Each structure stands twice: as C-alpha cells, then as structure tokens.
Image: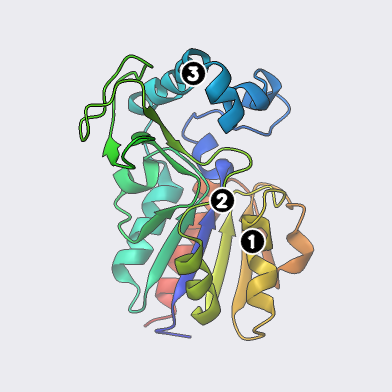
Amino acid sequence: MRAESIVILTGAGISKESGLDTFRDADGIWARHSLEDVATPEGFARDPDLVHAFYNDRRRQLPTVDPNPAHVALARLERDWPGRVLLVTQNIDDLHRRAGSRDLLHMHGELSKVRCLACGAIMQWIGDLSARDACTACATVGSLRPHIVWFGEVPLHMPEILAALDSCGLFLSIGTSGTVYPAAGFVSHVRTRGRARTVELNLEPSHGASLFAETVHGPASQVVPAFVDELLAGLG
C-alpha cells in the first residue's frame, strides 16, 4: 500500500477541537436555529437578510480560531506521502487550508466564498455580506449568496470524489457523525471494491462505525497525529 492513494473525509469533529460550533450536537447550531430558515434555498428567497446574518456570524468566527494538531497532521501526510492524498471535507471553514492542505475539496462549500446567482461567478469574501452588495464580476446588486451547499442541493465535486474513492488504497473518516449523505455512504462505496483499507478515527463510534474494518476512538488532535505518524513510519 506504500504508494497507493489515500482519500480522507473530515467532518465537524475535527473543527470542534479548534473551537468552532458543530451543527448536529445537542447544543449545536441546529439546536439554536431553524435549518429551514437559514440553510435552504427557500429560506434564502424568503428572508435573505436573516440568512446573511447567520453566515456573517459564522464567517466572523474564522479569524478567532486556528488549525489544531489534527489539521496539521493531515497536511503533513499530504506533503510526505509518496502517493496522492485527497482531503474531502464536509466542513465549511478554512482550517484545512490554513494548516497547509492543498489537495482539498469542500463538498459542502466554503464560508470564505460567495456565489452570484446572476452570472455564476464564485469569489473570495472575508467580510460581511448583505442583500445590498453587488457582484464584483457582473455588478448585479442583491445576487450574491453564501457559497454553501444547502439542504436540497447537490454537494460539490462529487464526480471527482467518487473517482478518487474508486481508486484509493486507504479511506479514512475523521470526526464525522455518519448520518449525513452522501458522505456517510463513502465507506460503503469503497467496500464494494473490496480492496481498500477503511479506518474511522472519531471521538466516539459514528452511526456507520461497523462498516469500517478498523476504528480508533479519541480526540482528533490526539488520534490523527498518531495515525499519521504510524503511516509515515511504515514507509521506512
């Protein structure tokens, strides 16, 4: 397996250790906000100011947190592994990028980007966004929305992700609940090929833990660096 490719799926559990709120915990974001109001196209059409305020709050959190040792370890694995290491994240924060990961796909979008509904342009956006802002590409006012995959929308980069899962030698799932599809189905997709090693690294068993050949449970900032050390030591 020395030079085979690795696909890594990460979820909210890895960012929680940096201080970001999760969405699905008992005290998480969906316990305090209606997802129908702030995370659907219909909610945005009904009250764009409410949706913008919600994501502005999330965006303002980003400069207050830093990548943790799990983020850093995954960037090190990408740098030192002789094969491809593709990082697929369900998270909308920028912590993987800031830790140094470059082969990175945000399947649920990114807080630091916005998308124009008029021209389709996607652009970086680090400040607050409102319905009164104009697209920097086409100058249309009120056409910008967060570049986030909302409920009822198709996740991004799926053809590339599925192709990578088809050819990987190792699939890692880190900090995920195992309840959000299609990401929760990735381990089953890999298992149908019957060749790749499948490992869950999670604070506690996910809903899909039994589908993995191996499970390691504990804080991501501890178990991920240890697992990466083990993988890289095996290259020797």
**Could you tell me which secondary element the residue under label 2 belongs to?**
loop
The local crowd at label 1, few if under 14, some if 14 to 19, many if 20 or more residues have their Cα within 10 Å, is many
Label annotation for residue 188: none
- Name the spot of residue 186 as percent of width and height, x first: 63, 65
Compared to 60, does 100 lie above or below?
Answer: below
Q: Measure the alpha-carbon separation of dots 2 and 3.
A: 20 Å
Residue drawn at x 48%, y 86% as measured from the top left? 1
**Which residue position is annotated with label 1?**
200
Q: Measure the alpha-carbon separation of dots 2 and 1.
A: 25 Å
Residue nearer the viewer, 94 or 137: 137
Mark 1 residue type: Glu
Name the N-terminal-most of marks 2 and 1. Answer: 2
Question: Which mark lies nearer to you, 1 or 3?
Answer: 3
- Name the spot of residue 117 as percent of width and height, x first: 39, 35
- Would you say 128 lies left or right of 33 here? left
Q: Residue 82 occupies which quadrant of the picture? A: bottom left
**Which residue position is annotated with label 2?**
154
Mark 2 residue type: Val
- Would you say 215 lies left or right of 13 here? right
Name the N-terminal-most of marks 1 and 3. Answer: 3
**Which residue position is annotated with label 3?**
48
Circles 1 and 3 in contact, beta carbons < 8 Å: no
Question: Which mark lies nearer to you, 2 or 1?
Answer: 2
Q: Is residue 3 visible?
A: yes
Q: Is residue 28 visible?
A: no
Q: Residue 45 occupies which quadrant of the picture? A: top right
- Name the spot of residue 160 as percent of width and height, x first: 45, 68
Residue drawn at x 66%, y 67% as measured from the top left? 187
